[in-house]
Amino acid sequence: MRTLELQGIGKSFGPVVALKSVDFGAEAGDVTALVGDNGAGKSTLVKCIGGIHRIDTGEVLIDGTAQHLHEPRDAAHLGIEIVHQDLALCDNLDVVGNMFLGRERVGRLHTLDENAMEQMARETLTSLSVRTVRSVRQKVASLSGGQRQTVAIAKSVLWSSKIVILDEPTAALGVAQTEQVLELVRRLADRGVAVVLVSHNMNDVMQVADSIAVLFLGRMATQVRRSDVTQTQVVELITSGRSGDLGLPGAESIGASA
Ligand SMILES: Nc1ncnc2c1ncn2[C@@H]1O[C@H](COP(=O)(O)OP(=O)(O)OP(=O)(O)O)[C@@H](O)[C@H]1O
């Protein structure tokens, strides 16, 4: 049973069919890359999983049970966390403040339990072997892009998310920071989280993914194990929806009808 399973998802915006009968799955312990050209439907699919868009057709199953996602809160209750590209961190708060934002711990006398929050934030970062964030009392405004990404990912761990969707986590990062964030992505999956990595960066995808799902013009061209494809084949699928003569399941029919 997959942690996240989408079956026959359809979503239109007026006359624009953004998603058509999309199947997709993400397993606990795996990094599942979601790739596709601009406008292929990645953001729309992510927003459907996150309860931001309501699906027109199809089903979302979490641990085998069909769920109705009407709003982001529904997704959060099911353990789905989306780490958006803009990260939605508050610059004026420190690392602790951001990791607990909206879910602050209240101690006795209804004051915020700062010590407990600080300790939990520190422990979470340590458990992920994060050494790049030196002080949890540092304001987020002063963090680098990679450090900010790290804080956003660690937040999902702190809240025991079972499905974490990362939207282009390395898009704004340099080489060294990209490596650190990819290592963190791997560790997140190794903890048993089902990680979905939305990315345009083929190097990232080939380096860290266990499974690759390719959207092409709103349809799922194919979802394959990373070990079964080469980078060239993935690029071919992204650009044409076809896998050439590779005989990958599902790819031919999509390419032919697109
Ligand atoms: N709110 C909306 N209203 C109308 N059309 C939309 C809306 N959101 C997305 N679309 C359309 O749905 C299709 C899929 O867009 P989507 O943003 O999901 O693609 P994407 O794969 O995330 O692209 P990119 O990599 O460029 O971000 C596009 O044709 C887009 O124009």
Image (cartoon, grey):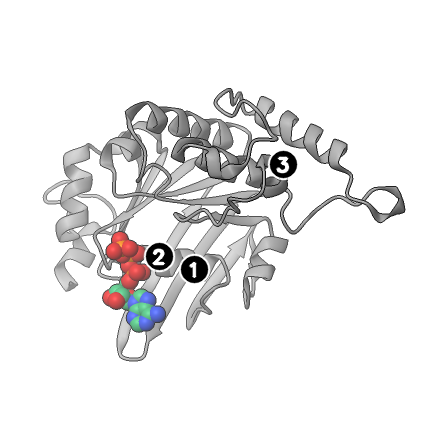
Residue 4 vs 219, above or below: the answer is above
Q: What is the quadrant of residue 172 in the picture? A: top left
Q: Is label 3 in contact with label 2 (beta carbons under 8 Å)?
A: no
Residue 43 is labelled as: 2
Question: What residue appears at the point 41 percent right and 55 percent down from the top-left corner?
Answer: 46
Residue type beneath disc 1: Lys
What residue is shown at x 36% (from left), y 68% (from top)? 10
Tell whether circle 1 marks a residue whose Cβ is less than 8 angstroms from ligand 1: yes
Task: State which tag comes first along the sequence, 3 or 2.
Answer: 2
Identify the residue at the far left of this view.
Answer: 244
Q: Is residue 38 above or below residue 53?
A: above
Q: Give me the residue at 26% from left, 74% from top.
A: 16
Instruction: Report the residue marked by disc 3.
Output: 96
Q: Is residue 93 visible?
A: yes
Circle nearer the N terminus (1, 3):
1
Residue 14: mark in rendering: none
Q: In this image, 31 relative to 138: left or right?
A: left
Disc 1/disc 2 C-alpha distance (Å): 6 Å
Instruction: Answer with the quarter of the image where residue 244 lies.
Output: top left
Q: Secondary structure at mark 3?
A: helix
Residue 75, x across and y down, in percent: 56, 57
